Image: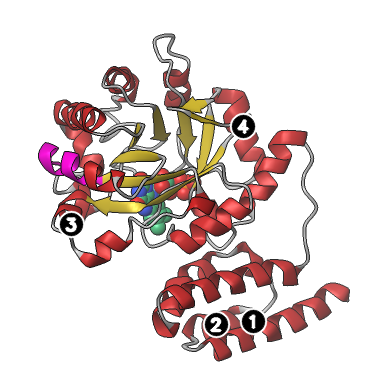
């Protein structure tokens, strides 16, 4: 499978763009565990063209994480074109346009999935950005605005005509936000449309090697993208890739092994931000990590972990868990 001049092996598995999650440290970790392409958090085109410092820092990409896509969103053609040109100077492998974000502050203003209500504008932006830059441009979107307006099959053809290099589809409407189950049937319909020749990347509810395999086998997608399943579990890419490539469920590593991965991630965040902000930033990963699920009477420890304000305190609690959990498993 190719996106522009990037070539991927069979069964590519991508890290989804996630605001406040897919910073450079997390992307590198996912890459280490086998993610075939990683995406930045979405970046506001309006903020980018106003050269807001915090936004500029989101453009930072490193050679070790390649291929990497920078994702932008907005609803104005000129701003999106200018933002894409600014992105190009950061040398990403791909520029991805976000037409899927459902949150009110974005979609309510007509950007993100709000663009699904103005498909002509969405296509105008896409065509203009494709013309403006020399890197492959891709799009990530949803099935449609709501159940009665699932326009993706028709939209995909028109997006392809704009010259995009690949299309990612999250199998939900905007109205669904993140609720219910992702519906992959329309993703399959796009992929099996004989007029479609660009790669189709399927997204939504892939949380295990089996669900990833099902997505490839049932719907024929060219790649899958994992979002929430990777939060607090960057090793999911290794598990999924192993299973897709040789059909075997990978052997589980020890509790301490996974805990060390999380600790490494926390250290990276602290180094990049500072102790307080780095720990705050890591809390989402700690809270979501499957590592701590199913430990008996864990709630008070979990609360303590999520309240810790220093590395010493946090790692102290984590070390106690490791000690206790190893005892538990050896019983
Ligand atoms: C915390 C969070 C932040 C997200 N931020 C973005 C974003 O910046 N850009 C984007 O295209 N999608 C964003 N998404 C959507 C994901 O990329 C993905 O489409 C969605 O979570 C469904 O995939 P999953 O079921 O594997 O999580 C975000 C999702 C979450 C949970």
| Crowd tier of the residue under label 2, counting other residues whose Cα lies within 10 Å: few below 14, some 14–19, many 20 or above | some
Which circle marks residue 305 in the picture?
2
Disc 2 and disc 3: Cα gap in Å?
34 Å
Query: SS of the residue at dot 2?
Result: helix
Of residues 154 and 311, the one drawn nearer to the viewer in this rendering: 311
- Residue at 76%, 83% in the rendered image: 323
Q: Quadrant of residue 215?
A: top right
Disc 3 and disc 1: Cα gap in Å?
38 Å
Of residues 32 and 299, the one drawn nearer to the viewer in this rendering: 32
Does the magenta-highlighted stretch encompass residue 77? yes
Q: Is mark 1 within 8 Å of ligand 1?
A: no
Q: Which residue is mark 4?
A: 11
Q: Which residue is mark 1?
A: 318
| Crowd tier of the residue under label 4, counting other residues whose Cα lies within 10 Å: few below 14, some 14–19, many 20 or above | some
Q: Are marks 2 and 1 in contact (CB under 8 Å)?
A: yes
Q: Is 276 placed above or below 51 here?
A: below
Query: SS of the residue at dot 4?
Result: loop
Query: SS of the residue at dot 1?
Result: helix
Does label 2 or label 3 sit earlier along the sequence?
Answer: 3
Which circle marks residue 47 in the picture?
3
Q: Which residues are magenta?
A: 73-83
Does label 2 or label 4 sit earlier along the sequence?
Answer: 4
> Where does the image place residue 157, in percent across and percent down from the top left?
32, 17
Q: Is 176 placed above or below 40 here?
A: above
């Amino acid at each position: 499978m190719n996106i522009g001049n990037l070539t991927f092996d069979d069964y590519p598995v991508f890290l989804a763009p996630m605001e406040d999650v897919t910073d450079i440290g997390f992307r590198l970790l996912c890459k280490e565990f086998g993610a075939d392409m990683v995406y930045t958090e979405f970046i506001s085109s309006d903020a980018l063209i106003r050269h807001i410092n915090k936004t500029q820092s989101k453009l930072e990409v490193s050679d070790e994480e390649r291929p990497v896509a920078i994702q932008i969103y907005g609803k104005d053609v000129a701003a999106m074109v200018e933002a894409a040109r600014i992105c190009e100077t950061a040398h990403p492998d791909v520029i991805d346009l976000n037409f899927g974000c459902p949150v009110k502050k974005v979609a309510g203003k007509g950007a993100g999935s709000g663009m699904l209500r103005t498909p002509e504008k969405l296509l105008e932006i896409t065509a203009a950005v494709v013309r403006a830059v020399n890197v492959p441009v891709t799009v990530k979107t949803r099935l449609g605005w709501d159940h009665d307006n699932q326009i993706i099959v028709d939209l995909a053809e028109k997006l392809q005509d704009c010259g995009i290099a690949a299309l990612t589809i999250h199998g939900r409407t905007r109205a669904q936000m993140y609720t219910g189950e992702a519906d992959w049937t329309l993703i399959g319909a796009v992929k099996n449309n004989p007029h479609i020749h660009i790669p189709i990347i399927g997204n939504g509810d892939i949380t295990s090697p089996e669900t990833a395999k099902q997505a490839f086998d049932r719907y024929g997608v060219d790649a899958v993208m994992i979002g929430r399943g990777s939060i607090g579990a960057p090793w999911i890419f290794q598990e999924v890739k192993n299973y897709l490539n040789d059909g075997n469920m990978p052997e589980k590593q020890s509790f301490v092994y996974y805990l060390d991965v999380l600790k490494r991630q926390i250290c990276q965040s602290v180094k990049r931000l500072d102790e307080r902000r780095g720990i705050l930033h890591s809390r989402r990963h700690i809270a979501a990590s499957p590592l701590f699920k199913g430990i008996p009477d864990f709630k008070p420890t979990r609360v303590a972990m999520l309240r810790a304000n220093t590395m010493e305190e946090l790692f102290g609690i984590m070390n106690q868990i490791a000690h206790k959990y190893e005892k538990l498993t050896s019983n």
